[in-house]
Image (cartoon, grey):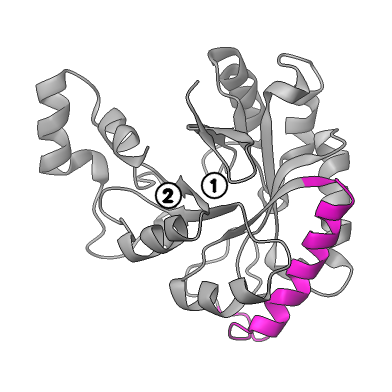
């Protein structure tokens, strides 16, 4: 497995395995997929408490298919756990469920505390939603920095950010993020954000590398495209005799 080197010298696998089952897969099916992914050679497993399956994934990790120090395990604090003390409690739950003593990376899943219930419609609105606040965000980040200092987390990460938001919070960080998660695929390249992160020495992790063509109908919009059906992607795939999904994946890394 190829790896990228993070700014402190640690290495992260180039390709990871996501564990968001959406509406299509049960928690047990996701856990079985993780089991097979580990056997197939995946070493980066990307989790999140909001996915609701970390306890099942923990059962798989406890089977010892791979030694802990050969894995890179990540998770994220969800939107409704941003108040004081809640990020710490969320991490401790995640560690218990995953049956781990520490995480390789812990992310702020979204930069604002706007909670949406699992399975809600895309038009749903939370009456308690608030716009992004650098002060509120840094309250969460300070807790993550403390968790890092306690060696419960080796790297800190941000997710679903923008350049403007990063410009607001990066100067305030005592411990800068090692990683940024962002949606990244041929039809949604986010070049400005990508280049900005790279300029700051932050490793980008791209999710939805083939554009999530099977996402729930509630998350689709008129005009959406399927990356694996793009003419340019199919042309490259046919020329090389590979599946269009591999073209998207190779583009992403």
Residue with the mark numbered 1: 22
Q: Residue at x 57, y 42 (%)?
A: 6
Say which label, 1 or 2, has the lower sequence index. 1
Q: Residue at x 22, y 21 (%)?
A: 242
Q: Residue at x 67, y 28 (%)?
A: 31
> Which x, y percent locates residue 35?
65, 20
| Residue 183 location, quadrant | bottom left
> Which x, y percent locates residue 207?
46, 47
Tell me if residue 111 comes above or below residue 51 in the rendering. Answer: below
In the image: residue 137, left or right of residue 84? left
Quadrant the C terminus occupies: top left
Tell me if residue 18 comes above or below residue 134 in the rendering. Answer: above
Q: Residues within 10 Å of mark 2 (few under 14, many from 20)?
A: some
> Which x, y percent locates residue 165?
53, 76
Query: How far apart in space, not on screen, are marks 1 and 2 (Cα)?
Result: 7 Å
Label 1 with label 2: CB-CB less than 8 Å: yes
In the image: residue 75, left or right of residue 64? left
115 drawn magenta: no
Q: Residues within 10 Å of mark 1 (few under 14, many from 20)?
A: some
Nearer-the-camera pick, 11 or 71? 11
Residue 215 shows which numbered tag? 2
Nearer-the-camera pick, 211 or 52? 211
Nearer-the-camera pick, 245 or 128? 245
Kind of element beneath mark 1? loop
> Which x, y percent locates residue 211?
35, 47
In the image: residue 197, left or right of residue 178? left
Tell me if residue 248 comes above or below residue 176 in the rendering. Answer: above
Kind of element beneath mark 2? loop
Tell me if residue 164 comes above or below residue 50 in the rendering. Answer: below
| Residue 125 location, quadrant | bottom right
138 drawn magenta: yes
Residue range (magenta): 125-153
């Amino acid at each position: 497995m190829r790896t990228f080197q993070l700014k402190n010298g640690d290495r992260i696998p180039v390709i990871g395995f996501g564990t968001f089952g959406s509406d299509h897969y049960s928690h047990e099916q996701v856990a079985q997929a993780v089991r097979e992914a580990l056997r197939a050679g995946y070493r980066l497993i990307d989790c999140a408490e909001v996915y609701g399956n970390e306890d099942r994934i923990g059962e798989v990790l406890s089977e010892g298919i791979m030694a802990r120090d050969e894995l890179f395990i990540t998770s994220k604090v969800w939107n409704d756990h941003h108040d004081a003390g809640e990020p710490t409690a969320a991490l401790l739950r995640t560690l218990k469920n995953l049956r781990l003593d520490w995480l390789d990376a812990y992310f702020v899943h979204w930069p604002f505390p706007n909670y949406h219930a699992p399975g809600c419609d895309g038009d749903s609105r939370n009456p308690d939603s608030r716009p992004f606040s650098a002060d509120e965000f840094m309250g969460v980040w300070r807790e993550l920095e403390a968790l890092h200092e306690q060696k419960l987390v080796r790297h800190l990460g941000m997710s679903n950010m923008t350049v403007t938001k990063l410009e607001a919070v990066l100067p305030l960080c005592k411990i800068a993020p090692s990683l940024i998660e962002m949606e990244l695929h041929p039809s949604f390249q986010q070049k400005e954000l990508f280049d900005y992160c790279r300029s700051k020495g932050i490793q980008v992790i791209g999710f939805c590398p083939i554009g999530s063509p099977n996402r729930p109908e509630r998350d689709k919009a008129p005009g959406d495209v399927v990356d694996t059906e793009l003419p340019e992607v199919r042309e490259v795939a046919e020329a090389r005799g590979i599946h269009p999904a591999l073209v998207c994946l190779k583009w992403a890394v």
